[in-house]
Amino acid sequence: MARPSSSLVALYVTICSLFFVASKMLISFLLYKKWARKKRIIDNSLAGGKMVIFRSAGGKTLQSLSPKSFLGMLMGLSSKDVIGAGGYGTVYRLRLGLGGDNNKAAAAFAVKRLNRGSAEMDRGFERELDTMGDIKHRNIVPLCGYYAAPHFNLLIYELMPNGSLDALLHEHDHQHQARLLDWPARYRIALGVARGLSYLHHDCIPHVIHRDIKSSNILLDHDMEARLSDFGLATLMRPNASHVTTVVAGTFGYLAPEYFDTGRATTKGDVYSYGVVLLELLTGKRPTDESFLEKGTRLVTWVKETMEEKREEHAIDEALLHQGGLLLLPADEVRLIFAVADKCLDSDPGKRPTMAQVVKMLEQGKPH
């Protein structure tokens, strides 16, 4: 077989070289277009945009960033950075620092993006700012700052490393739950949520009705301390008012029954939702668990039936029983949580305790 001539080899090498150079030029052009598009988006966002950073622990880290560099980091986020999504926006994890996930010095934030265009979304953004701007409490997620632009709004929170109570209770196996959600941790979470709500209801001026208390809005910090989050539905109430009339909103399974009838948001509605969360901590079941839907019942009804029949042990989360059985659980504390939940879930809102009373009951029942 004849060997190719040197001229053909040279032609082949030349074509390959030209193709390689052309492909590199095309890739460079596309990368430039992508960079230019990001720069244009950032520049357009900066036009008329406003960035405010609060003087909190996390805010000090953010204060070193210009709005342009912050938005540049945000543009680099992708679907793998999404840690939550709801009716009012998408939440991303944003890390500042060069060390990646293993860099303990790197600061981490949760950035909620709300696209503008919906009047209700804009009101949700304003509600979170009105509610969170001056709140400093150990059981409420700190708001570090915000960014308001013509086409979108951003809320910047400290990232809670242990995620939501909902995820820990319902999306992990018993072994993982047993490690993080043993009985002392659940009792501490119940008390932390109560303290956060009590602060909103009684100590804030104006008072705050959260309106969306549920396990997915309870986040857990490094020490498994409970932090209330997501104030997109929160309603401000003057100290001398008894209620605020609103459009019914919230999450099915957590809403107080009278709210559907009256459309009046009250602190006692939050108390009812808190009672449902207590049942989740006790049973490990969501209020909309499929097993309840199949039987035509719901979590609140099922637990109340077990209490009336004096067989509460049948309702306790199996993950707790895997830690050594019912006999190793502190019976007095378990009975107290059942009793507090029952009071919070009274069909008559007037008979429900205030959150200040709930805190007192739990603190008195907590071992010193």
Image (spheres, grey):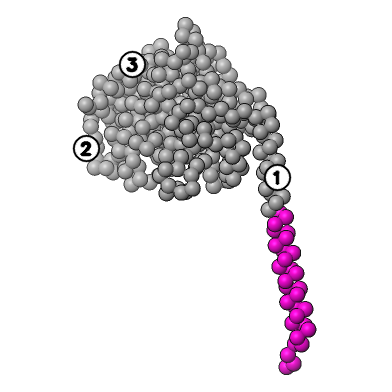
In the image: residue 60, left or right of residue 138: right
Mark 1: which secondary structure? helix
* N-terminal label among 1 and 2: 1
Q: Earlier in the sequence, mark 1 or mark 3?
A: 1
Hey, which residue is sitting farthest bottom in the picture? 1
Q: Residues within 10 Å of mark 1 (few under 14, many from 20)?
A: few
* Quadrant position of residue 275: top left
Residue identified by numbered label 2: 328
Q: Amino acid at mark 3?
A: Gln
Determine the residue positioned at 57% across, 44% down. Answer: 77
Choose top left, top right, bottom left or bottom right for residue 14.
Answer: bottom right
Please give the residue where the numbered disc 1 appears in the rendered image: 37
Give neighbour class at mark 3: few <14, some 14-19, many 20+ (Cα, 10 Å): some
Identify the residue under disc 3.
357
Magenta range: 1-30
Please determine whether, in this image, residue 156 is positioned above or below residue 267.
Answer: below
